[in-house]
Amino acid sequence: MTAPGYAEFLAAKARRVEHAGPDVEAGQMHPMLHDWQAELTAWAVRTGRAALWEDTGLGKTVQQIEWARHSGDTSLIVAPLAVCHQTAREAAKLGVDARYTRDGGALPPGVWITNYEQVSKFDPASIDAVVLDEASILKNSDGKTRRLLTDHFAGVPRRLACTATPAPNEPEELCSQAEFLGHATRANMLAAYFVHDDQGWRLKGHARGPMFAWMASWAVALRRPSDLGYPDTGYDLPGLEIVPELLPVAIEAEGQLFPTDLGGVGGRAKVRRDTLDARCGRAVDLVAAEPDEPWLLWCGLNDEADVLTRAIPGAVNVGGSMSPEEKAEALLGFADGHINVLVTKPAIASQGLNWQHCARMAFVGLSDSYEQYYQAIRRCYRYGQTRVVRAHIVLSELESQIAANVARKERDAAAMTGELVAAMAANTHHRRAA
């Protein structure tokens, strides 16, 4: 049952979500789009300030290009640098001349693409519509970057936020995207729907339904086409094998005869350093066992990346010290098959890139971030993949609690996302019937 006052709050919020975009229909979208993609894109164009929260591989790129083409004379797509070049390639398939620029200033008419580092150079008054690709940057970035993106584009009349389905128990992501789109401030959303306790921000029990219903007026969450009643033909994944590689590594633990836990952040870091050679050695053996396969090796420490790159012939390390242009060139080199073994960090390359040609990866260590883990796997395990993807999780036995924590977060996110998708799919069915 909805708590007193929430019905009135929801009604007031719904009145503010006014359609601000051109009146277009699905039939006006490029024929390359599937029917469900065309329906969602046309809805997002009409809504004007919308969010497409679709799982990886569902074609958000072609949808955002069509949205940009229909939403104004001058549109800007903002994406991670390596993804900018992928976006230009996809635009060409749609017959759209979307050009990458870093020049800044006032933009002339057309569809333009730039990377996040260049945003402040552009005059927002010259832009009719803006897309944030990989919009989870609003949550993952520091407050300064989030504030810059929100404030810089606040006067742009049409805005689109695209990302993989966000977990509804992540208030930072939901609040940041609602604020970027101009539907609610972070403070108002937290006050209305969340409570803060010793575990951080979490949804109020009676607020879940009203929040989902309100968000459904400006956002759509999707895991697969059947969530909207369409067939899943062509969107069947061949399978994912998660292979735990728990190594029995001897570690000296201060004050303990045998190490029994990681001992907090400092302890985790020490365990990771002390087991580096063993974990890297196992990863090197995995690659050597299948040398003709493209491999993606995820690291957390520079030392891990250095050891792997030295030990594996032809391996290329994409690290933080490289310029954005150098990173983009190497990441696209892996996508195009010029690099066979890529070593990098989830913080650098876990979002937006399409690497379906690769079906082998290893996490040489693991953090507690479920989102980074999920996004990293989804670079290869995404629609369009034709082979079973095998992901090895290389940890010491003592670090197994990290893997268990990530698995718990995965279960929680799947359950909550299912509820969010159902609420938004119901709103779509009501919209069709109206």
Image (cartoon, grey):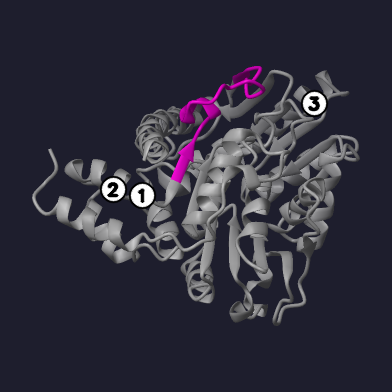
Which residue is at a point 65% across and 34% down the rendered structure image?
34
Q: Nearer the viewer, mark 3 or mark 1?
A: 1
User: How far apart are labels 2 and 1 at the CA level?
Assistant: 6 Å
Disc ID at residue 243: none
Amino acid at dot 2: Met
User: Residue 10 at what x, y percent from top left?
Assistant: 23, 53
Looking at the image, residue 72 lies above or below residue 379: below
Which residue is at a point 86% across and 45% down the rendered structure image?
333
Looking at the image, residue 31 lies above or below residue 153: above
User: How far apart are labels 2 and 3 at the CA level?
Assistant: 46 Å
Secondary structure at numbered mark 2: helix
The answer to whether marks 2 and 1 mark residues whose Cβ atoms lie closer than 8 Å is: yes
- Image quadrant holding the C terminus, namely top left
Tell me the residue that label 2 is attached to. 211
Q: Is residue 19 left or right of residue 94?
A: left
Quarter location, residue 364: top right
Specify few, some or many for label 1: CA neighbours under 10 Å numbering under 14, 14-19, or 20 or more.
Answer: many
Q: Nearer the viewer, mark 2 or mark 3?
A: 2
Tell me the residue that label 3 is attached to. 287
In the foreground, 305 or 431: 431
Which residue is at a point 40% across and 28% down the rendered structure image?
411
Magenta-colored stretch includes residue 227: yes
Amino acid at dot 1: Met
User: Residue 249 at what x, y percent from top left?
Assistant: 58, 26
Tell me the residue that label 1 is attached to. 215
Q: Is residue 384 left or right of residue 189?
A: right
Q: Is residue 73 left or right of residue 202?
A: right
Q: Where does the magenta region start and end?
A: 220-243
